[in-house]
Each structure stands twice: as C-alpha cells, then as structure tokens.
Amino acid sequence: MSYIRRVLLEGEQVRYTAKMHWIAYLPALLEFVAGAALAIVAQVWSAPGLYFLVVPVLVVALIHFLALWIVRWTTEIAVTDRRVIYKTGLIRRETNEMNMDKVESVKVDQSILGRLLDYGDVTVLGTGAGFEPLRKIAAPISLRNHITGV
C-alpha cells in the first residue's frame, strides 16, 4: 500500500499523481556506456590491462543505477482535492505536505532538453515556506496545472 493511500483523510480524493522522469537514470547510463567503451577499446587494442578498469566502472554504473531506481521507485507525488503530498525515501523517509489554501504559486524550471523530453523541476511556494524543488519530474506543466487549478 502506498504512503499516499495511507495518509488520505476521510473523503479526500487523489486528483493527480506525478512521478520522476526516466531521465533520472541518465548518469548511470552514461557510466555504463563508458564501461562498454572501455571494454571495446581493450578488445580492439588487445590491452588486457584495461579490463581491470572495465569491471569497476560497470559495477559503479550498476550500483548507481540501483540507487537511482530506489529513489525513483520510492518517490510519490500526489495532488488531492485538499493538499499536495510529496514523499521520498525507503528507509529514511522524508515527507512534505501543503494544504491547497496555503499554495501561493508553483514554479517550473525546464531546460531545453527538459522541454523536448517533458521533464523539469517543480517548486511549490506557499505562505511562509514551500517545498524543496521536486527534481526531474515528468510532465511538470501538468503537475503545475493540477496544483493551481484545484
């Protein structure tokens, strides 16, 4: 059972759920490509000494991918008819909630690549404080529209 389903108040309904974009895996993918390139160079040049670099690079890429997967898997973002809920973390949980009547504005930051692939950073600003930026969110404009349109 998800965290968001467990914390819903009586009569509260989820209007929209957001998630992290797959681009979050890009650093691990680039590390894997570097390891594969090292393996190809070692094979082509017949340099067995390079193979000692290939394994650590691929292991680091795998560990980084798993860490990013856990972050993406454990991040929950929801807009209900009463509040915005954000939760991340597997063992050490971090949650943030804001009532809709406390939301002043929603800031969306997108790079050129973010606009092309439809991801970006979303910051919910409220009276007195706000959320930390929600990084690499898929469809950030849609999330903003659901927050400001409720």
Image (cartoon, grey):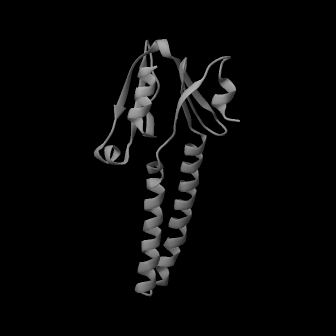
Q: Give the residue drawn at x 66%, y 29%.
A: 5
Q: Quadrant of residue 86?
A: top right
Compared to 20, does 14 lie above or below? Answer: above
Asked whether 58 or 71 is in front, the reply is: 71
Left or right of 13? Residue 109 is: left
Marker count (numbered): 0
Whether 17 is drawn above or below 113: the answer is: above
Q: Is residue 133 visible?
A: no
- Seen from this angle, which residue lies furthest bottom? 46
In the rendered view, would you say 57 is above or below 78?
below
Residue, x 50% and y 72% (percent of image)? 54
Q: Residue at x 49, y 72 (%)?
A: 53
State the image coordinates of residue 105 (x, y, percent, origin top left): 38, 20
Query: Horizontal and vertical percent for residue 8?
Result: 65, 22
Horizontal and vertical percent position of residue 59 = 56, 64
In this view of the protein, can residue 140 be seen by the observer? yes
Q: Nearer the viewer, residue 138 or 57?
A: 138
Q: Residue furthest left?
A: 112
At a point 38% along the width and 43% down the height, the residue shown is 118
- Location of the N terminus (image quadrant): top right
**How far from the left and from the top, in percent, is residue 124?**
43, 24
Q: Is residue 88 left or right of residue 37?
A: right
State left or right for residue 22 relative to residue 108: right
